[in-house]
Amino acid sequence: MMNLRTCLASALVVLALGGTSRSASPETNAIAASLPFEVRRGHVMIQAQLNDTTAQSFMLDTGYGVTLLPPGQADALSLRRAGRITIVGIAGEEQAGMFEGPEFDFGGLRWKPRRVAAFPTDDSSRRARHGILGAGFFRKYVVEIDPRTKRVTLRLPEDFRYAGDGEVVPLTFKDSTPIVEVLFVEASGEQIAARLELDLGCDSCLCLGRDFTEKHSLLPADAPSSGTRSGVGGSMKTHHGRTPDLRIGKLTFSKPRANFFLDGSPADAPLAGHIGYELLREHRLILDYSRSRLIVERAGRGKGD
């Protein structure tokens, strides 16, 4: 028979894991799960089961403050409603229901968030038909995205140590969204400092707000609209172009493509805009929220951890 001290120790382990079914391993860099991913319309997609049902597609999105279920899943799983939430997007905000969280299964690794969000099932067809893994997922795991192996690797933060030669980029956070400090470098050598959201749910290289581009003369005042960006709240007119060279730490990206918003911004002031997955898609990325850092390994380099 298990004594009281053993029972209490076991309970503490379960609480520390926050609902996953896996116990912490003493092995450095122990892998909790390794999953194949595909890039679909510029988005990193992985599969997960909800409450042992058929696997569903989920997008990895650092720009999303909550985990969002695919349309209809809250009803299909008979989840208990737990209030409402306002989701802010690039063109406004919309209401979504909050529900007590189902259990996610990532290839045997189980995670049960406290709550998840879901838009009404009869909502607009312009919305994505997949789910979204947002801030809670990235807080729970160290998430590695490796384009060479086409795999997403999940580790528990306490199991992870990095000893490679990748660029370690500090992250700060605005609410649940990671923020990166960057420099735009003009041909003259002039440098423009900016703070950008890291939004892996965006399929562009960069999206920049009108106030920032006007202040630094990055776009002619009479630039025509050449497209739109759609998201929660609607869509915004943009001009497609290129920026000066972009530096993130010691990494330099030569004149990356950008969507210049002709009105408004994809991020609240004083942020200049956001970085999308397209800018980083050829690099191995390690998102380590527990240590407030993004690790970027240049394309073609081997793993150093």
Image (cartoon, helix red, strand yellow):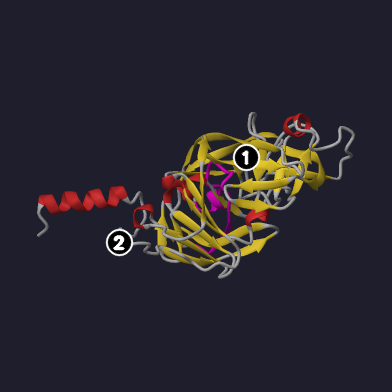
Q: Amino acid at mark 1?
A: Leu
Q: Position of residue 171 (x, y in %)?
A: 51, 42
Residue 269 in the image: above or below residue 42: above
Q: What residue is rendered at 42% in x and 50% in y?
A: 140
Whether residue 65 appears in this view of the structure is yes
Q: Position of residue 156 (x, y in %)?
A: 38, 55
> Which portion, as a residue range, is magenta?
53-77
126 with respect to 298 (left or right): right
Q: What residue is rendered at 34% in x and 62% in y?
A: 28
Is disc 2 surrounded by few (<14), some (14 to 19) or many (20+) residues within 10 Å? few
- The local secondary structure at tag 1 comes to strand
283 with respect to 208 (left or right): left
38 or 292, which lies in front?
A: 292
69 or 256, which lies in front?
A: 256
Give me the disc on residue 25.
Answer: 2
Q: What residue is rendered at 67% in x and 35% in y?
A: 272
Magenta stretch contains residue 59: yes
Q: Which label lies toward us, 2 or 1? A: 1
Q: What residue is rendered at 76% in x and 34% in y?
A: 213
Q: Residue 193, located in which quarter of the rendered image?
A: top right
Determine the residue located farthest toward the bottom in the rendered image: 149
Q: Position of residue 4 (x, y in %)?
A: 11, 50
Label 1: which residue? Answer: 196
Magenta stretch contains residue 1: no
Q: Position of residue 80 (x, y in %)?
A: 46, 43
Whether residue 56 appears in this view of the structure is no
Give me the disc on residue 90.
Answer: none
